[in-house]
Amino acid sequence: MWTLALACAFFLCIHLMISGTVLKLQIISAIGPTAYYILFSLFSLAGLAWMMHAYAIAMADPLNLRIWQAPVLLKALALVTNFVAFQLIIIGYMSKSPTSMGALKHLGDKPVYGIIRVSRHPVLSGIGLWALTHMACNGNLASWIFFGSLLALCVLGANSIDNKRLTLMGDTYRSISKRTSIIPFAAILTGHTPFVPAEIGVAKFLFASSIYFVTLAFHEFLFGLSAV
């Protein structure tokens, strides 16, 4: 269990204490942007692999306390929330975003468009929703440490990106923030922006849906546990 906690702390630290701080700029000035991004990607992949390996071991750890047992209704609801999470993550990766790297180049004529109406951080909010769903359905200490770390990274990371984009883009990003939300559908439900499914596109929706249902069908084979 302590190995899992250490792995999660490492993964959080490299993102929150390097990527989101002036230390990133200092490293880039010393080794160049290409070397920095290569090294950061390698450390991130290594950290995630360490987390996953430690999580698998921690599930059998005597310290892995059972906090609660998720009811059947909650597990059924999780199928819906995970479906939404997959849509956010996959469509988010396929869409231009004012919060992505090189945001000024990706703005276009309509910065609030498509999946950005649902969340201005579609990938992070999707991962966060997925992590929160798994925390709710897996009421053991190891799962709460693992998925809780990913959820914390998404929440803190989204706020960090907002602050950096606001500094970079000023009133332009302030206007985008007022019309969008981090929490999925919050801006739509509060009337700050309309929901326009046609902007997302049928092809992207079907592609994300197919990935979700394939993952659902092979969940036990891939992860050793049934998804239902």
Image: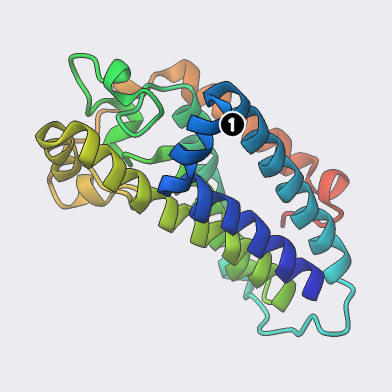
Give x and y (percent) for residue 97: 34, 27
The residue depicted at 52 percent of the width and 49 percent of the height is 18
Above or below residue 160? Residue 206 is: above
- Quarter containing the C terminus: bottom right
The one of 33 and 44 positioned closer to us in this rendering: 33
Please state if 201 lies on the left or on the right of 173 as rendered: right
What residue type is disc 1 on? Tyr
The one of 89 and 53 positioned closer to us in this rendering: 53
Report how many numbered discs are placed on residues in the image: 1
Give x and y (percent) for residue 28: 51, 32
Give x and y (percent) for residue 72: 64, 70
Question: Residue placed farthest to the front in the image?
Answer: 30
The residue depicted at 74 percent of the width and 72 percent of the height is 142
Give x and y (percent) for residue 117: 27, 35
Above or below residue 205? Residue 142 is: below
Please state if 16 lies on the left or on the right of 122 as rendered: right
Could you say whether the residue bearing mark 1 is in a helix, strand or loop?
A: helix
Q: Does residue 123 appear in the picture of this structure?
A: no
Q: Does residue 161 appear in the picture of this structure?
A: yes
Q: Mark 1 points at which residue?
A: 36
- Quarter containing the N terminus: bottom right
Residue 36 found in image quarter? top right
Q: How crowded is mark 1: few (under 14 residues within 10 Å), some or many (20 or more)?
A: some
Please state if 140 lies on the left or on the right of 123 as rendered: right
Q: Which colour scheme is used?
A: rainbow
The residue depicted at 27 percent of the width and 38 percent of the height is 165
The one of 165 and 152 positioned closer to us in this rendering: 165
The residue depicted at 38 percent of the width and 49 percent of the height is 158
